[in-house]
Image: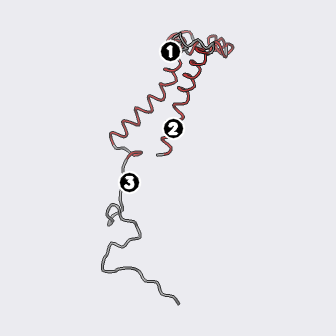
Amino acid sequence: MRGLGLLCFILILPVLGALGHDVYVTYQDENFAKTMMFSNVQYLWTHYSPETYVWSMKNIDPPLWKGFIVPVIQLYTVIAAGIPAAIVFSVLILLRLLGLPPFRDVSVARGHKRGQFGFKSTNAAKGRMKYKRK
């Protein structure tokens, strides 16, 4: 279960990073009266790495660029960063509702009742084990 918590934390980091960037850019001049501005992926890509944006436009087929990449880069960065997290969270919720492997109860070994420790004898006639000193 710790692995799932770590996975959820890692998937939330890009969303928090995008939100932190937008808060910084909006309020860097300390004018807290203006509304929050959310950046889109295209702004971040062209502002921080324009060479790779131009290279990608030149080397990707135009139908693929217009059909798949332009709709993604026109999304708000917070939403685009949250899509993988939303997909994984919805799968985890579905697995939890169906009781599938990561959330399945651990089965108790045959012959033991729930709550008993493995070293405790189930046969009351045997009693406690006695150790003899040689």
Q: Which residue is drawn at 46% across and 46% down?
A: 1
Find out whether the residues at labels 3 and 1 contact each other: C-beta distance under 8 Å: no
CA–CA distance between discs 2 and 3?
A: 22 Å
Residue at numbered disc 1: 75
Residue at disc 1, secondary structure: loop
Q: How is the image coloured?
A: secondary structure
Query: As displayed, is residue 69 above or below residue 116?
Result: above
Percent across and percent down for residue 118 are: 40, 67
Residue at numbered disc 2: 7
Quarter where residue 28 is shown? top right
Residue at the extreme bottom: 134
Amino acid found under the numbered disc labelled 2: Leu
Percent across and percent down for residue 8 are: 49, 36
Q: Residues within 10 Å of mark 1 (few under 14, many from 20)?
A: some
Find out whether the residues at labels 2 and 3 contact each other: C-beta distance under 8 Å: no
Nearest the camera: 44 or 56? Answer: 44
Q: Which residue is drawn at 36% across and 65% down?
A: 116
Percent across and percent down for residue 48 are: 66, 16
Quarter where residue 27 is shown? top right
Q: Which of marks 3 and 1 is nearer the N terminus?
A: 1
Residue at the extreme right: 51
Percent across and percent down for residue 56 are: 63, 14
Residue at numbered disc 3: 106
Q: Residues within 10 Å of mark 2 (few under 14, many from 20)?
A: some
Nearest the camera: 23 or 93? Answer: 23
Q: Is residue 87 left or right of residue 32?
A: left
Query: As displayed, is residue 11 above or below residue 126?
Result: above
Q: Which of marks 1 and 2 is nearer the N terminus?
A: 2
Amino acid found under the numbered disc labelled 1: Leu
Nearest the camera: 5 or 59? Answer: 5
